[in-house]
Image (tube, grey):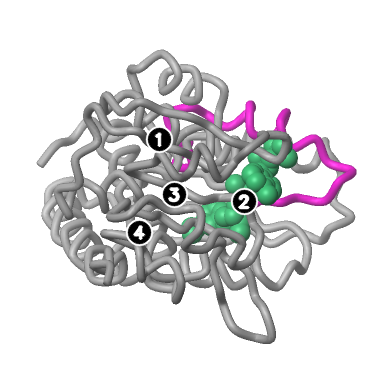
Amino acid sequence: MATILDGKSLSIKIKEQVKNDTKILTENTKIQPHLVVVLIGENPASASYVRGKEKSCINAGIKSTVIRKDESILQEELELIIKELNEDKSVHGILLQLPIPKHLDSEKVISMISPLKDVDGFTPSNVALLANGNPKLVPCTPLGIMRLLEHYQIKIQGKHCVVLGRSQIVGKPIASLLLLANGTVTICHSKTENIKQITKQADILVVAIGKPKWVDDTFIKDGATVIDVGISRVDDVIVGDVNYEKARQIAGFITPVPGGVGPMTIACLLENTLACYKYLEGVSK
Ligand SMILES: NC(=O)c1ccc[n+]([C@@H]2O[C@H](COP(=O)([O-])OP(=O)(O)OC[C@H]3O[C@@H](n4cnc5c(N)ncnc54)[C@H](OP(=O)(O)O)[C@@H]3O)[C@@H](O)[C@H]2O)c1
């Protein structure tokens, strides 16, 4: 039976650390770290994620502002908001909650966020730095996964790491981080043939496809580490992309959903916000 990679308790420790660091830093500077989230429209999942981020910021002593806009907002209005936040010296982190309505050009808006305030690590320059092996601000979910692997001392060097999914926010950046940690990385996607043959070779299997319980024990090598990034609501229950009950019979380590990668994402958002604050205010602890 697999050992559980407990993202919930690790995230609590990280959040405590951020809280302590924030306290010490703000005592010296008298300036509070400040994260601004831009939320467009009424998507209930997005609204719930934003509430979670807001609560975690406040608990850590980070000022949180949510700019809520109607989904009829025009591209120019949104660009102006980003421009003003870039220029506002009291703002250290900017997060555009995705997805945004289809009539808006999300790529363009993201590219306008100052790379120094890019707590999500999605701007072209931060993406390029990671791809070039010199990461600065890294997307929070992949960062959270790396922190979990590190905490549980799961060896990456020389290991076959298979990533299911090639999204900009999870699949590609986690593949880059695993490669940077000297893993041998294979990325699979919806057009990959013979997927089970590949996943069966994985020492570390990261699943980020958005298909509830799609990966079961027949995809997994004996003793492998399984990281389930998926979050789907099925019959009012939150489930991952991995069939947890089946997978835990064969895996060596596994993340639960909820309580695995999700809480680590928020903890890493706080860390990224504090990193932006330190850089922009020219302080260190
Ligand atoms: N825990 C967290 O904090 C967190 C953070 C972000 C996302 N998530 C969750 O993670 C999941 C993935 O999110 P995402 O934004 O990365 O998704 P996404 O943008 O929809 O990308 C899904 C990826 O999975 C691939 N894919 C789909 N079906 C597949 C299959 N049967 N076999 C292999 N690959 C397949 C797609 O391939 P193609 O490129 O060929 O279409 C695509 O690359 C979602 O459930 C999301 O809610 C969780």
Q: Earlier in the sequence, mark 3 or mark 2?
A: 3
| Residue lying at 38% horizontally and 55% vertically, measured from the top left | 226
Q: Is residue 14 above or below residue 125?
A: below
The amino acid sitting under disc 1 is Val
Nearer the observer, 233 or 97: 233
Find the distance from the CA under tag 2 to the CA under tag 1.
20 Å
Mark 2 or 4: in front is 2
Looking at the image, residue 30 sits to the left or right of residue 119; the answer is left
| Residue lying at 53% horizontally and 32% vertically, measured from the top left | 187
Looking at the image, residue 48 sits to the left or right of residue 181; the answer is right
Disc number placed over residue 138 in the picture, else none: 1
In the rendered image, residue 275, in percent from the top left (x then y), is placed at 29, 39
Q: Are marks 1 and 4 in contact (CB under 8 Å)?
A: no
In the rendered image, residue 114, in percent from the top left (x then y), is placed at 52, 29
Nearer the observer, 258 or 226: 226
Mark 2 or 1: in front is 2
Instruction: Kindly tell me whether mark 4's CB lies below 8 Å from ligand 1.
Output: yes
Looking at the image, residue 131 sits to the left or right of residue 6; the answer is right
Find the distance from the CA under tag 3 to the CA under tag 1.
9 Å
Helix, strand or loop status at disc 1: loop
Q: Quadrant of residue 253?
A: bottom left
Nearer the observer, 9 or 120: 9
Q: Are marks 3 and 4 in contact (CB under 8 Å)?
A: yes
Which residue is the site of mark 2?
209
Find the distance from the CA under tag 2 to the CA under tag 4.
18 Å
- Majority SS type along the magenta span: loop
The amino acid sitting under disc 2 is Ile
